[in-house]
Amino acid sequence: MALNKQMSAADVVAQLRSGMTLGIGGWGPRRKPMALVRELLRSDVKDLTVVSYGGPEVGMLCAAGKIRKLIYGFVTMDAIPLEPYFRKAREAGAIEVMELDEGMFEWGLRAAGMRMSFLPTRCGLASDVLRRNPQIKTIASPYEDGEVYVAMPALKLDAALIHVNEADRLGNTLIKSHDPLFDHLFARAADACYVSTEVLHEQLQLDADTAKMNLFERYLVRGVVLAPFGAHPTYSSPDYGWDMDHLKRYDASAREDGGWQKYAEEFVAISEAQYLEKAGGADRLSQLKRPVF
Amino acid sequence: MSATLAELMIVAASECFRDNGEVLASGIGIVPRLGVSLAKLTHSPELLMTDSETYLVSEPVPLGPRGDFVPKYEGYMSFDRVFECVWGGRRHAMIGPTQIDRWGQTNLSVVGGTYDKPKTAILGVRGLPGNSINHANSLFVPNHGPRVFVAGEVDMVSGVGYKPERWLPGMKQDYVDLRRIVTDLCVMDFGGADHAIRVLSLHPGVSFERVAEATGFPLLQALGMAETPLPTAEQLALIAKLDPHRLRASTIKNDPPALKVAA
């Protein structure tokens, strides 16, 4: 088969344009496509609308001034609950926000993936989510009950970035983590989905049980990037845990003068290979303990 | 055996889950999680609970590093499936919001300043709007004071409550089900007229006046307002097993004993 979607992280970022709406898979500090985000941080792409169950990638993109608008339900690093650079940006009024219930957020992605303009839900009614997002309308059931629902608008994405455990050059992917999260919905909601992967195969040859870990179709995947430890410093179950030492250091940088610049000089303004060395090398990263909940 | 205040609160939290039937019981945070765990091990084995990551377990998983403990999985509960449970209503969650108002509305998003330029950004509304409008919820407050129990409305209504003006014609309020609030001073519920908050029990050594002073809105006393029971020796032993690293000691400032010593 002639299909070969393998590309570099730089090739992916070359497809992105300032002003785009960009979905980022994962959840908090879990399976974030950090290698792709680092490449984005190295680029001059800006004015992004970022759609994310937010973790440190949101903080980094805020710190680098890449985000014009954030669509989110939360931003957190779990064990470090408050994301420092998100807080700074939010408290400074530096970003426009569309703050949503987690389920509304899911519904928005589903609507986009189904090519619907909206999906109805009770989530958000009677809360300030509607007051703060007057563009979100309600709708009455056309049936006898007449119940009023939130008409959650589709969250259509120009592009989505996702990190997976395994993939092949055709764009087939395996998500082996305990929780697959909502990455398949990001893939469906996006005009173009780019995945980074821990392991890249020529072509996947699977047994039936493993094939169940293929959660979305390769026709959704525009590009595949080989990025071992590409979720670092977030948790890529079952391969490696989050890097709490690194996250603490990142968190502490936010309280130093010029802290982001120093962090970025050390961990962003270098190649991905240099990054992995700086982060402790493959031996250390593969030993990162899985978090105990 | 003398109990700490945190342990008394764990027992009080476990009581919130009594006679709930087969529901997904989600205790978010150390005390709520230990409360659910204790409930499942004692009076309510029918509760469904997870390992706090992705799997349903048939017995509660201890907190922190587990040594040779092997979780007993009985099913699966990805975030996607948690949402399905939320929308279907068969869930009771206990969380610790940053602010709570007299209508039971909660806030986990921003505090102070303006919405566009808040004094303090917290997490975001998370799942609170959906949880609160779909299933039973109880609340946990480790620092009962007027900054948590605010005088007016919470700064960003994340979890919904019983404020009539918030409910427009056609919106279904029927599934809002606020159960109890467990704090470091008392246990409260929403059993007053129009769901007004009332004190069910005071922790040992705490007066109603002290609770009232620490609350930004008027409180009622439940008929037969009692003293929150101290943990039994059996409950303390189970808590010790569920929390072998004593993470509960970090939940209340200075980890005080349950029985306040007279000054």
Image (tube, coloured by chain):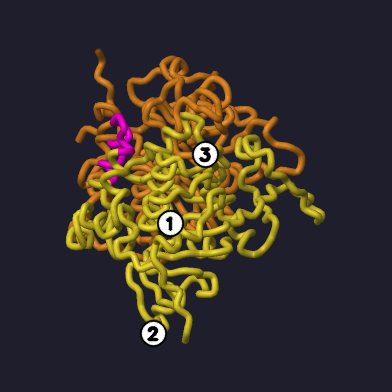
Chain colours: A yellow, B orange
Question: Percent position (x, y) of residue A188?
Answer: 56, 65
Q: Position of residue A193 (x, y in %)?
A: 51, 64
Residue where numbered disc 3 is placed: B179
Query: Which residue is nearer to you in this view: B251 or A149?
Result: A149
Q: Is residue B166 left or right of residue B35?
A: right
| Residues in magenta, as a range | A247-261
According to the picture, the residue beneath numbered tag 2 turns out to be A205
Residue B29 occupies quadrant = top left
Q: Give whichever of discs 2 and 1 has the lower sequence position.
A: 1
Is A220 a magenta residue?
no
* Vertical comparison of B51 with A188: above or below: above
Q: Secondary structure at mark 1?
A: loop
Q: Is residue B238 left or right of residue A65?
A: left
Residue located at (47% from left, 46% from top): B93
Q: From the top left corner, tell me how far across and down residue B162 is, in percent.
A: 62, 33
Q: CA distance from mark 3 to mark 2?
A: 52 Å
